[in-house]
Amino acid sequence: MKVVILAGGFGTRISEESEYKPKPMIEIGGMPILWHIMKEYSAYGFHEFIICAGYKQHMIKKWFADYFLYTSDMTFDFTQGNKMTIHNQKSEPWKVTVVNTGLHTMTGGRIKRIRSYVGNETFLMTYGDGVCDVDVSKLVEFHKNHGKIATLTSVMMKQEKGVLDIGGDNAVRSFREKSITDGAPINAGYMVLNPEIFDYIKDDNTVFEQEPLRKLAEQGELMSYLHRGYWQCMDTKREMDILERLWENNQAPWKKWED
């Protein structure tokens, strides 16, 4: 099952960092938050990724092209004709496709653009700016058991995110815009989507969190997987610092892999 990660936005709310790099490339513990998210999925056996890039997309491509430079020790011997030796080369069991989905494309449009890379199969999708300790295997099992088109992971937080009205059967009754006074379940990403999802997306201007998810909710095709564990987005410098402190203190709840 492929993992689609939205990584093309401008990240204007954390402009102190995103002015110089794409938001998913902002580092936590010396590695991009995108890497942390990929390591999460990989820990559960999901190793094939499609990165929906846009803003400064060349930086994401270059990072993967030079991955071994960032993770291995190296000797540069200028006495031997600029010979380069890689020591303890580290690699990942990953297949990564980075797709330029456009500079101003909305979230739905980015998903629509990678349809040919996904194929006619169910896939995982999340945002490139949030980490979580959700059990992805159980999330996928939940999705397969209910048989609906889409599952999103929801968390209980008082934040300005898309608000969900969830029924007793875990079906999402409605999906509406955020309000600062809300304390309802919010959309945390970490979705599982059947290929029919592409039919709900019109074009580049489609915001995935608006018409597509609302229509799915109205049709009873959107389910919620309530996660009561850790989740944190990185919208601001303050939130970035929170993640950095957790990582530095070896207390990162999202770290489910061995070094």
Image (tube, rainbow, N blue to C red):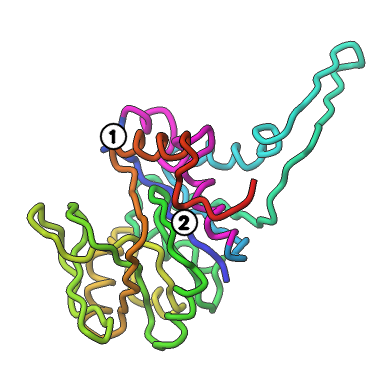
Q: Is residue 33 magenta-colored?
A: yes
The secondary element bearing badge 1 is classed as helix
Magenta stretch prevailing secondary structure? helix
95 displayed left or right of 128:
right
Q: Give the crowd class for mark 2: few <14, some 14-19, many >=20 residues within 10 Å.
A: many
In three-dimensional space, the C-alpha distance between marks 1 and 2, rounded to whole angstroms, equals: 23 Å
Which quadrant holds residue 153? Answer: bottom left
Q: Circle 2 sits on which residue? A: 5
Asked if 65 appears above or below 197 in the picture, the reply is above
Q: Which residue is depicted at the point 29% across and 42% down?
A: 235
Bounds of the magenta segment:
16-43
8 displayed left or right of 35:
left
Q: Earlier in the sequence, mark 1 or mark 2?
A: 2
Which residue occupies the foreground of this view, 165 or 157?
157
Residue 191: image location, x then y, percent: 40, 68
Query: On residue 217, which mark appears?
Result: none
Which quadrant holds residue 230? Answer: bottom left
The secondary element bearing badge 2 is classed as strand
Residue 226: image location, x then y, percent: 31, 71
Query: On residue 238, which mark appears?
Result: 1
Which residue occupies the foreground of this view, 116 or 133?
133
44 displayed left or right of 204:
right
Residue closest to the far right: 80
Q: Which residue is depicted at the point 39% across and 47% down?
A: 129
- The type of residue carrying mark 1 is Arg
